[in-house]
Image: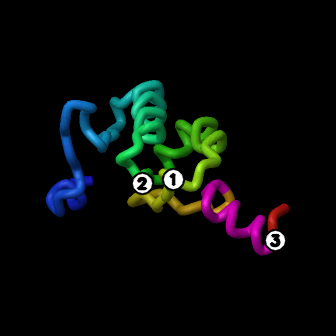
């Protein structure tokens, strides 16, 4: 997240911040509330979330079917990436006819 903020991606305005820094003390409810808020904003086109954090809000992610904002799950340091959980990978496999 720090790299994105240094690059100027993060923003705070009257609607609040367009990012959430999650650590071990962040409650899953806070992550779910922030994610729901990001998905409802018309100025957010892409949500980047690492997979371990995404696992804590998997129900919200699985319920999100809109193309925009797109939710991109990225690997986390020290945690293996599981493509079977990634919503984008699930959509790609479904379009290719390889979905289980």
Real-space Cα distance between discs 2 and 1? 6 Å
Instruction: Write the start and end of the magenta stretch as one range.
Output: 85-96
20 is higher (above) or lower (below) than 76: above
Provide residue 71's location: percent of width, then percent of height: 50, 53
Which label sits on residue 45?
Answer: 2
The quadrant in which the C terminus is found is bottom right
Magenta run includes residue 92? yes
Rate crowding at label 3 as few (under 14), some (14 to 19) or many (20 or more) other CA atoms within 10 Å. few
User: Looking at the magenta stretch, what is its main secondary structure?
Assistant: helix
At x 46%, y 61%, the residue is 75
Q: Secondary structure at mark 2?
A: loop
Judge from the rendering whether residue 56 lies leftward or rightward of residue 26; answer left or right.
right
- As rendered, which of 39 and 62 lies closer to the eye? 39
Provide residue 44's location: percent of width, then percent of height: 38, 49
Q: Which residue is mark 3?
A: 98
Which label sits on residue 68?
Answer: 1
At x 53%, y 37%, the residue is 56
Q: Please tell me in which quadrant of the rendered image residue 61 appears.
A: top right
Provide residue 1's location: percent of width, then percent of height: 27, 53
Magenta run includes residue 46? no
Q: Are marks 2 and 1 in contact (CB under 8 Å)?
A: yes
View extreme (front): residue: 42
């Amino acid at each position: 997240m720090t790299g994105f903020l240094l690059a100027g991606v993060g923003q705070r305005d009257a609607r609040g911040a367009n990012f959430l820094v999650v650590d071990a003390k962040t409650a899953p409810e806070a992550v779910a509330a922030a994610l729901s808020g990001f998905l409802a904003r018309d100025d957010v086109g892409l949500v980047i979330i690492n997979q371990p954090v995404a696992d804590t809000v998997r129900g919200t992610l699985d319920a999100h079917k809109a193309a925009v904002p797109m939710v991109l799950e990225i690997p986390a340091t020290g945690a293996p990436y599981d493509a079977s959980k990634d919503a984008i990978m699930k959509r790609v496999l479904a379009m290719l006819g390889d979905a289980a």
